[in-house]
C-alpha cells in the first residue's frame, strides 16, 4: 500500500467503526423502530457551543437522533508509518532507508540496522502525509468498483486486478473485477470470514503529499 500511495493510486482507506452503529437496543425492544428505519450521515457536533467534534449522526423516522464520534474528520492531516531502517552509524534524525521502494534518504547506501516495524517509525522519519477530504459510513460490501480502485487495487494486463508486494510479486487478487481483489485484500488483512461479516466501516478519502507532515503547509 505504500507503493500505491507513492504512485498516487491509493486515495481511500476503510476502517471498522467501533462501536458499530447498531443503535439503541433498548429502543428496539420498546418497539420504536427497526434497523432499516435508521438513516446515517456524518457531521459535526457542538458541545456547550464551543467544542466541535466530527462523527456519525444516526436519525430515525421518529425524529430520534443519536451521535457517536469517528476517528478522523475532513481536514485532519495524518502521517504515514512504513517499514524502515537506519544506518548502524547515524544521527538521531537520519538518514533513513525505506523498505517499500528501497529508497535511501539522501540517496546514500549505508550498512543498516535490523528491520524496524512501521509501528516504531517516529514522526520525523515519515515521508508521506495524508489530508482527509471526505468521510462516509457504509457497510463494507457497499464499496463500488471505483472505490476499490481508489483503495490501491491495480490492473495489469497479464494478471488482472490485484495488489502487489514491493518485490513485484502478487500479494492478493488476480481478479477480473476490482472489488474481487479488494475482498481478497480485506480478508488477507483482517482474517477469514472478515468480508462476510460485512461490518460498518468509515471510508476515508484523502490527498497524498510526498513530504513529512511538519514540512507540509497547513
Image (spheres, grey):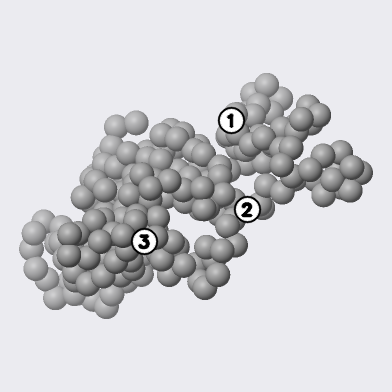
Name which quarter of the figure residue 185 lies in. Answer: bottom left
For the residues bearing labels 2 and 3, Cβ distance under 8 angstroms: no
Taking depth in this image into account, of 114 and 133 the one nearest to the observer is 133
Label 1 element class: strand
Q: Earlier in the sequence, mark 1 or mark 2?
A: 2
- Which residue occupies the extreme left position in the image? 108
Q: Is residue 126 above or below residue 216?
A: below
Q: How far, Cα to Cα, is label 1 from label 3?
A: 31 Å
Q: How far, Cα to Cα, is label 2 from label 3?
A: 25 Å
Q: Residues within 10 Å of mark 1 (few under 14, many from 20)?
A: some
Name which quarter of the figure residue 165 lies in. Answer: bottom left
Q: Position of residue 72 (x, y in %)?
A: 51, 42
Residue at 51 percent of width and 48 percent of height: 142
Q: Is residue 14 above or below residue 169?
A: above
Front label number (1 vs 3): 3
| Horizontal side of residue 143 vs 56, given as left or right | left
Residue at 56 percent of width and 42 percent of height: 137
Q: Earlier in the sequence, mark 2 or mark 3?
A: 2
Q: Position of residue 146 (x, y in %)?
A: 36, 44
Amino acid at each position: 500500500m505504500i507503493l500505491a500511495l507513492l504512485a498516487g493510486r491509493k486515495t481511500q482507506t476503510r476502517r471498522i467503526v467501533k462501536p458499530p452503529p447498531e443503535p439503541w437496543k433498548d429502543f428496539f425492544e420498546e418497539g420504536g423502530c427497526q434497523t432499516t428505519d435508521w438513516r446515517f450521515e456524518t457531521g459535526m457536533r457542538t458541545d456547550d457551543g464551543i467544542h466541535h467534534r466530527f462523527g456519525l449522526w444516526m436519525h430515525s423516522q421518529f425524529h430520534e437522533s443519536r451521535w457517536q464520534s469517528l476517528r478522523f474528520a475532513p481536514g485532519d492531516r495524518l502521517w504515514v508509518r512504513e517499514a524502515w531502517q537506519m544506518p548502524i552509524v547515524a544521527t538521531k534524525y537520519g538518514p533513513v532507508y525505506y523498505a517499500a521502494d528501497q529508497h535511501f534518504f539522501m540517496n546514500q547506501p549505508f550498512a543498516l540496522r535490523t528491520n524496524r516495524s512501521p509501528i516504531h517509525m517516529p514522526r520525523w522519519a515519515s515521508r508521506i502525509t495524508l489530508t482527509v477530504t471526505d468521510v462516509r459510513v457504509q457497510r463494507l460490501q457497499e464499496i463500488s468498483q471505483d472505490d476499490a480502485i481508489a483503495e490501491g487495487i491495480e490492473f495489469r494486463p497479464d494478471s488482472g486486478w490485484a495488489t502487489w508486494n514491493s518485490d513485484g510479486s502478487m500479494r492478493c487478487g488476480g481478479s477480473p473485477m476490482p472489488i474481487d481483489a479488494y475482498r481478497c485484500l480485506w480478508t488477507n488483512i483482517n482474517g477469514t470470514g472478515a468480508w462476510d461479516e460485512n461490518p460498518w466501516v468509515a471510508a476515508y478519502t484523502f490527498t497524498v503529499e510526498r513530504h513529512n507532515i511538519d514540512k507540509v503547509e497547513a
